[in-house]
């Protein structure tokens, strides 16, 4: 089964794409949605300063002892234990 990311999920839920869009065609026979995509999609209406996946990535790197986390994301780079590239 195909999988979709958060951006596709949000477009499908919000109906911002026409009925015959690439997203609709991609999921025509069903699609798998990860827990991460669902969780991130629920944070979008609140417009947090950092995305759910950004926070999750940083915490996973922290727990694994792989810091600093390199990023081009200026908002994420303001957090301790990250490094803006």
Image: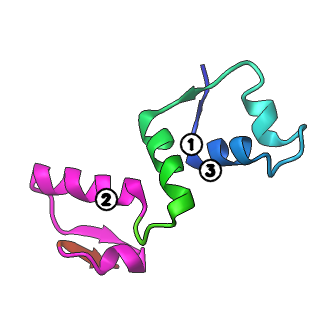
What residue is at 74 percent from the left and 32 percent from the top? 26
Q: Are marks 1 and 3 in contact (CB under 8 Å)?
A: yes
Badge 2 element: helix
Q: Residues within 10 Å of mark 2 (few under 14, many from 20)?
A: few
Above or below, 22 against 31 in this view is below
Q: Please name whichever residue, 22 or 56, is drawn nearer the observer in this view of the structure.
A: 56
Q: Residues within 10 Å of mark 3 (few under 14, many from 20)?
A: few
Mark seen at residue 35: none
Q: Are marks 1 and 2 in contact (CB under 8 Å)?
A: no
Q: Please name whichever residue, 72 or 20, is drawn nearer the observer in this view of the structure.
A: 20
Residues in magenta, as a range: 51-80
Residue designated by label 3: 7
Mark closer to the chain start, 1 or 2: 1
Image spot of residue 42 (x, y percent): 51, 48
- Seen in the image, is 66 located left or right of residue 30? left
Residue designated by label 2: 55
């Amino acid at each position: 089964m195909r999988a979709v990311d958060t951006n596709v999920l949000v477009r499908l839920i919000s109906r911002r794409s026409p009925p015959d869009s690439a997203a609709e065609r991609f999921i025509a026979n069903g699609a798998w949605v990860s827990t991460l995509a669902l969780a991130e999609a629920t944070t979008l209406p609140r417009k947090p300063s950092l995305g759910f996946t950004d926070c999750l990535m940083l915490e996973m790197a922290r727990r694994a002892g792989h810091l600093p986390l390199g990023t081009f994301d200026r908002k994420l780079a303001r957090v301790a234990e990250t490094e803006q590239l």
